Amino acid sequence: MSERSNSQREGSKVEASANAIVFVVEDDLSMRRSLTNLFQSVGLDVVAFGSAREMLQSTLPDVVSCLVLDVRLPGLSGLEFQTELARLNIHIPIIFITGHGDILMSVRAMKGGAVDFLTKPFRDQELLDAAVAATERDRKRREDEQTIAKLNSLFETLSPREQAVMKLVATGLMNKQIAAELGLAEITVKIYRGHVMKKMRARSLADLIRMTETLGIRTNRPEQT
Amino acid sequence: MSERSNSQREGSKVEASANAIVFVVEDDLSMRRSLTNLFQSVGLDVVAFGSAREMLQSTLPDVVSCLVLDVRLPGLSGLEFQTELARLNIHIPIIFITGHGDILMSVRAMKGGAVDFLTKPFRDQELLDAAVAATERDRKRREDEQTIAKLNSLFETLSPREQAVMKLVATGLMNKQIAAELGLAEITVKIYRGHVMKKMRARSLADLIRMTETLGIRTNRPEQT
DNA sequence: GCGCATTATAAACGTAGGTATAGTTGTTCT
DNA sequence: AGAACAACTATACCTACGTTTATAATGCGC
């Protein structure tokens, strides 16, 4: 059985980097224990598994985290697991560790987006540095994703017509052009446009345009030669 | 001496991927020759050097290209050369090849942005695939850079005051607010704003805002909670 | 000194954007 | 049936934006 939920939480005195979780997938029990101890010693929460399958079957908490992954594993290998996580749209930054690696493996791992690839034996500090870099990368990714998610949920509150108007506003069309495009009266466009600004909480047109950029809203724009 | 400028150009019947250059830095003469032949056989131009220093001293043409780089070299090593190129802001995509590599090397290379890291012996097709991927990456990078360069040169044609107005317009301020900010009459701001639109060749405000995004123009914007 | 670009402004006018108020029609949920 | 909402329009009014024409001071290069 895997020693999960062993989050170091004896007191409320947790380090600044608290509530970041390091997932460990490593089949060797003693190695798994020593990795767990290492991360806990610097105040990181750890959840460890003995195989990829175990981790996939558990419910992963939605917090800043990274994954320390042994390349050689029973069942799914580390590299296969990396591919599988990508397929499932799970973007956790991965640090590979291995005792018997080769260059081809490491290059594949790095091409697949791994943060680092360490060979045993490695210094504790190397792994800790990699974990810090990895969690930082995850924090940024989550930040970006949340920004987009927020904007998207605001955009969802718009009625279909309002969304259409917003898109055309973003392309730089004038109200009367938008009206012609949608077969509306100009006044109607003005009203919807007002709704868009309110619902999207945009303080200015510049603001709204930037939101459409973030959302990746694009229409046929033959502009900017 | 290095066999440079041996660009395969007997006729004007060059392949579709023409005028992309593969730079080769490899100290072993026979290897250098076979690499040169390999790339020329698929219609790529090749410029080969025996050391990093030679390449740095030559004038690099400003076209889509990639670099096939031996890790072990006399003088500057391949990895050191990679660092040096980054320091010089030369962003050519690198494919490492090596006969005596290790994992640490390959990971460092990939972390440093290398496209691939191949160990000898490798199949010709592997290297060719990597070269295609690398030149494609370079093509995209150049495309993006040129877009920015064009916008920048347009921006440079603006007078200081016009640039200031453009920045404040991008933040979403109204003309009267911009006027207050710069200590101008509103009418003056309107005039400059018109100049900005003309000189930047922006068809709409939306267009202009996107240009400022591309240019990375940012001012203190306490917007978008 | 002359020409030129930059900075700055004014008057005047026209267009575009935005809001408030009010009303019609149609759908959907309760 | 009635409430709630989406879509749509109209009148009226105000603000913001943009251009044209004209004027003028400053500074820079030749």
Image (spheres, coloured by chain):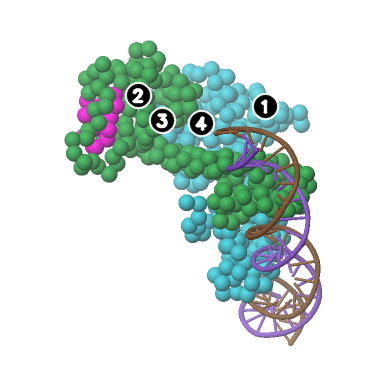
Chain colours: A green, B cyan, C brown, D purple
Give the CA distance from mark 2 to mark 3. 11 Å
Q: Which residue in the structure is indicated by mark 3?
A: A92
Q: Which residues are magenta?
A: A34-48
In screen coordinates, is B118 left or right of B204? left
Q: Earlier in the sequence, mark 2 or mark 3?
A: 2
Residue at the location (42% across, 20% down)? A81
Within the magenta stretch, is there residue A45?
Answer: yes
Query: How many C-alpha atoms fall within 10 Å of the one at disc 3: few (<14), some, or many (≥20)?
Result: many
* Subunit ID for the residue under disc 1: B
Tell me the mark number nearer the camera, choosing from 2 and 1. Answer: 2
Q: Which residue in the structure is indicated by mark 4?
A: B115
Query: How many C-alpha atoms fall within 10 Å of the one at disc 2: few (<14), some, or many (≥20)?
Result: many
Tell me the mark number nearer the camera, choosing from 2 and 3. Answer: 3
The x and y percentages for residue D21 are 81, 75
Tell me the mark number nearer the camera, choosing from 4 and 3. Answer: 3
Which numbered circle lies on residue A69? 2
Given residues D10 and A141, the one toward you in this image is D10
**Residue type, numbered disc 4:** Val
**Residue type, numbered disc 2:** Leu
Given residues B174 and C24, the one toward you in this image is C24
Is the residue at mark 4 from the same chain as the one at mark 2?
no
Query: How many C-alpha atoms fall within 10 Å of the one at disc 1: few (<14), some, or many (≥20)?
Result: many
Element on which disc 1 rests: loop
Please say whether residue A137 is visible from this viewpoint. no
Residue at the location (75% across, 52% down)? A186
The x and y percentages for residue A53 are 37, 16
Give the CA distance from mark 3 to mark 1. 41 Å
Vertical position of residue B156 compared to residue C9: above or below? above
Asked if the residue at tag 1 contacts the one at tag 3, i.e. Cβ–Cβ closer than 8 Å, the answer is: no
Residue at the location (57% across, 39% down)? A156
Q: Which residue in the structure is indicated by mark 1?
A: B43
Element on which disc 4 rests: loop
